[in-house]
Amino acid sequence: MIKKLTKEKFVNIATNGINIDLYGKYVEDYIQNLIKFVEEVSKDYYVTDFDTEWCEISKRGLEIIRVCFEKNKVIFYLPKQKPDDLQHKSDISYVINVVYMHSNAWEAINNNDKINQPIDIWPV
C-alpha cells in the first residue's frame, strides 16, 4: 500500500514537485503513461491537452491543473483562472494525489518492483 500523504508531504509535493527517475525511458513515455493512468483511474477527470513534456487535466470542461516534466521532476501549475471554490480546490488535491500514486507505480514498474518511499503494511 502506498503510504498516505501527510499534509506536510502534500504541500511539499504541490509546491516543489515529485522527483522522477525515467529509468532510461523518454519523457514522452512517462507523459503517455500518466495520461492513460489518469483516464483509467477516474471517470470524471480527463486530459484535455498534452505535448511531449506536459499534460493538462480537466474535469467538466474546467482545467484543473497542468502537469509538467522538468529537470527530473513532475511540477504542477495551477490554471490561469485561480481556483475560488472548495470543489475546484478539492479537484486539484485529487489530481495531485493521483499523479503521486502514478509516480510510485512508475517507479515500481521500472525499478524491479521497488519504490523509494516507506510503505505501510496492511493490518491483519
Image (cartoon, rainbow, N blue to C red):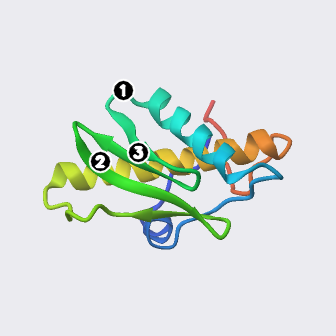
User: For the residue labelled by badge 1, is the local secondary structure a helix, a strand or a loop?
Assistant: loop
Vertically, is 23 above or below 11? above
On screen, residue 47 versus residue 91, left or right, reads right
Vertically, is 120 above or below 6? above
User: For the residue labelled by badge 2, is the local secondary structure a helix, a strand or a loop?
Assistant: helix
Instruction: Please state, as top left, top right, bottom left or bottom right, where the N terminus lies in the image.
Output: top right
Q: Which amino acid does label 2 sit on?
A: Asp
Which residue is farthest left?
85
Q: Which amino acid does label 1 sit on?
A: Lys
Q: Do the residues under discs 1 and 2 have CB atoms within 8 angstroms?
A: no
Q: Is residue 76 visible?
A: yes
Residue 124, image x, y percentages = 63, 30
Residue 95, image x, y percentages = 40, 48
Q: Which amino acid does label 3 sit on?
A: Asp
Residue 69, image x, y percentages = 58, 60
Residue 21, image x, y percentages = 74, 58
Q: Is residue 120 visible?
A: no
Question: Which residue does the numbered mark 3 point to in the structure image?
Answer: 49
Label drawn at residue 43: 1
Q: Residue 106 lies in what quarter of the image?
A: top right
Earlier-in-chain disc, 1 versus 3 = 1
User: For the residue labelled by badge 3, is the local secondary structure a helix, a strand or a loop?
Assistant: strand
- Identity of the residue drawn at 86% across and 42% down: 112
- The residue closer to the viewer here, 72 or 124, is 72
On screen, residue 113 versus residue 122, left or right, reads right
Question: Which residue does the numbered mark 2 point to in the structure image?
Answer: 91
Q: How crowded is mark 3: few (under 14 residues within 10 Å), some or many (20 or more)?
A: few
Q: Do the residues under discs 1 and 3 have CB atoms within 8 angstroms?
A: no
Which residue is farthest right?
112
Q: Residues within 10 Å of mark 2 (few under 14, many from 20)?
A: some
